[in-house]
Image (spheres, rainbow, N blue to C red):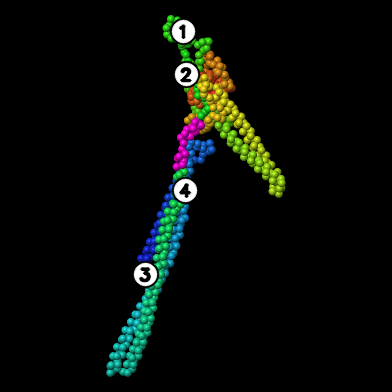
């Protein structure tokens, strides 16, 4: 069924239908454009979301908890998913929207050409019809004039009063009119035959061919829409495998969450390496009470050998509660040897620095070897380069190697010091814990430390070993005085200190203590609590303010 035969007289309707087809094509193109804009916006919002929750981090801030690692893996997969949405938008833009817009322009040009051909054919047929109609009217006029001449001639020929000249003149006029009518008849017949031929060609050849071209154009438009519908779906189908991999990656990340591993990381992150505090001794305050022999009450035996009670837990009634004079808590100093850290954390940081320096040293060694090989090549083949031009770079590399070796040696010495202290601390424990041995050296669990000042719990700086400055019996002898030492200043605890070693004083962060003896250069300051308990605390753990009238009044940070 073709338009040329079935719709030979529907030129105007076909004109409207083909225009509607192009409008529908452009409407679908607009739909595809809005769809790809949605995809672009969606992909952009996903990338911004990933960027918001996955900010740039330094090497030390890399997440270690499995839950965090899995979350960042999910963010990476989501970022890849956003990339696939961008691919969808790009493919729709090139293979669907762009193709439709180009095809729409081609359709408009082709439709315009076919319609112009149809109008030209119709105009030519109209022109043939006018010529035929004019010849017909002329033939009609000539026939009427010939009839009048015939009537006039017949009237004069039958009139006995008419002269011969009048009759001849009427006869001549009749002949002329009759001849003109015959010529008009022949012309009319020729124009009519020509019009009929052109009309047959118009409705049987020209118009069917033009309408067939319009039909082919419209069918190609329909086929093109079907192809773009399929391309629209194929664009989505092509990214489905990659999107499925992204989703599988998210599921894999979710399965990688390990609560036991995270708990172990918490232990590794916050373990200080200090020993738990030992048992507190019994404090007998009834030793100085006198009892009569007739008293039947049970009395507490006096200490044998005249040993005085340990006054470090005694309560001083004369201790006065003083307010802390300083404002904002100062930050913990970050030292090069990490001595401000607990032992385990310090050991880990030193070991990490040594590993990093070793990698840098290996790079310098490789660079030196490469430069020496290049120098040998230049010496054997002078045309390739000047060997002396490499000497400054070789010297610089050697200098860097020496610096790195010096740094590694320095850090290794600090590491040996830490491992020695950890080992010594593990060998000496209170009698109640003789069966428990602290880990030695690198066999102990690794700890970590963060220098962020706004954390709720900050790890304290390195504390001196009380065994290096005071022996336990020296602590006891110093606390055996009957009269308490005068207060020469006060301090505020910057960090908590468990005071598990004998002669040391337990203190909490932000606790205010009284200074009764300055640091003698061994890293320990003797302090007294408001409750009267006395002992030594690490000088680096407290912020000290000496009284103005005390000797050497100075403030330590």
Query: Could you say which disc has been placed on residue 242 in the image?
Result: 4
Q: For mark 4, does the 10 Å Cα neighbourhood hold few (<14), some (14 to 19), or many (20 or more) residues?
A: some
Marks 2, 4: nearer the viewer: 4
Q: Which residue does the numbered mark 1 point to in the structure image?
A: 290
Q: To which quarter of the image does residue 406 belong?
A: top right
Query: Could you say which disc has been placed on residue 48 in the image?
Result: none
Q: Which residue does the numbered mark 3 point to in the structure image?
A: 5
Query: Could you say which disc has been placed on residue 531 in the image?
Result: 2
Marks 3, 1: nearer the viewer: 3
**Mark 1 or 2, nearer chain start:** 1
Q: Position of residue 443 (x, y in %)?
A: 55, 30
**Mark 4 or 1, nearer chain start:** 4
**Residue span colored magenta:** 251-270
Task: Say which residue appears at 46% left-offset and 46% top-offset.
Answer: 245
Q: For mark 2, does the 10 Å Cα neighbourhood hold few (<14), some (14 to 19), or many (20 or more) residues?
A: some
Is 267 one of the magenta-colored residues?
A: yes
**Mark 3 or 1, nearer chain start:** 3
Query: What quarter of the picture does the N terminus occupy?
Result: bottom left
């Amino acid at each position: 069924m073709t338009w040329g035969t079935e719709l030979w007289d529907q030129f105007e309707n076909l004109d409207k239908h083909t225009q509607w087809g192009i409008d529908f094509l452009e409407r679908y193109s607009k739909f595809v454009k809005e769809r790809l804009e949605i995809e672009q916006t969606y992909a952009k919002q996903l990338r911004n979301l990933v960027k918001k929750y996955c900010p740039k981090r330094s090497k030390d801030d890399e997440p270690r908890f499995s839950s965090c690692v899995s979350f960042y893996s999910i963010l990476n997969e989501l970022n890849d998913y956003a990339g696939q949405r961008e691919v969808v938008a790009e493919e729709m833009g090139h293979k669907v929207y762009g193709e439709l817009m180009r095809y729409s322009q081609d359709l408009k040009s082709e439709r315009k050409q076919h319609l112009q051909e149809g109008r030209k054919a119709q105009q030519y047929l109209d022109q043939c019809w006018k010529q035929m109609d004019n010849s017909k009217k002329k033939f009609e006029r000539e026939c009427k004039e010939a009839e009048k001449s015939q009537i006039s001639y017949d009237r004069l020929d039958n009139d006995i009063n008419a002269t011969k000249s009048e009759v001849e003149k009427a006869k001549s006029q009749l002949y002329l009119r009759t001849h003109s009518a015959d010529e008009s008849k022949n012309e009319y017949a020729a124009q009519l035959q020509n019009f009929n031929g052109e009309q047959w060609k118009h409705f049987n050849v020209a118009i069917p061919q033009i309408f067939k071209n319009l039909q082919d154009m419209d069918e190609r438009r329909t086929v093109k829409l079907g192809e773009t519908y399929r391309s629209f779906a194929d664009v989505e189908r092509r990214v489905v495998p990659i999107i499925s991999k992204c989703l599988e990656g998210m599921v894999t990340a979710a399965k990688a969450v390990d609560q036991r591993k995270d708990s172990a990381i918490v232990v590794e992150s916050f373990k200080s390496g200090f020993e738990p505090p030992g048992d507190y001794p019994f404090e007998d305050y009834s030793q100085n009470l006198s009892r009569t022999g007739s008293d039947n009450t049970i009395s507490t035996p006096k200490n044998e050998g005249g040993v005085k009670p340990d006054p470090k837990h005694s309560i001083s009634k004369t201790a006065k509660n003083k307010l802390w004079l300083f404002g904002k808590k100062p930050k913990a100093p970050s030292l090069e040897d990490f001595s401000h850290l607990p032992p385990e954390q310090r050991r880990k940081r030193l070991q990490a620095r040594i590993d990093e320096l070793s990698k840098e040293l290996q790079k310098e060694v490789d660079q030196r070897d490469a430069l020496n090989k290049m120098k040998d090549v230049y010496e054997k083949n002078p045309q390739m380069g000047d060997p002396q031009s490499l000497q400054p770079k070789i010297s610089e590399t050697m200098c860097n190697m020496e610096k790195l070796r010096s740094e590694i040696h320095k850090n290794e010495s600090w590491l040996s010091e830490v491992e020695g202290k950890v080992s010594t601390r593990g060998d000496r424990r209170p009698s109640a814990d003789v069966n428990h041995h602290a880990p030695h050296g690198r066999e102990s669990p690794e700890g970590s430390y963060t220098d962020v000042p706004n954390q709720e719990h900050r790890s304290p700086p390195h504390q001196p070993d009380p065994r290096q400055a005071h022996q336990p019996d020296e602590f006891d002898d110093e606390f055996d005085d009957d009269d308490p030492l005068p207060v020469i200043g006060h301090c505020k605890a910057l960090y908590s200190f468990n005071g598990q070693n004998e002669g040391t004083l337990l203190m909490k962060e932000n606790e205010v203590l009284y200074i009764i003896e300055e640091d003698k250069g061994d890293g320990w300051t003797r302090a007294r609590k408001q409750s009267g308990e006395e002992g030594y605390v690490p000088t680096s753990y407290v912020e000290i303010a000496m009284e103005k009238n005390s000797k050497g009044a100075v403030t330590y940070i």
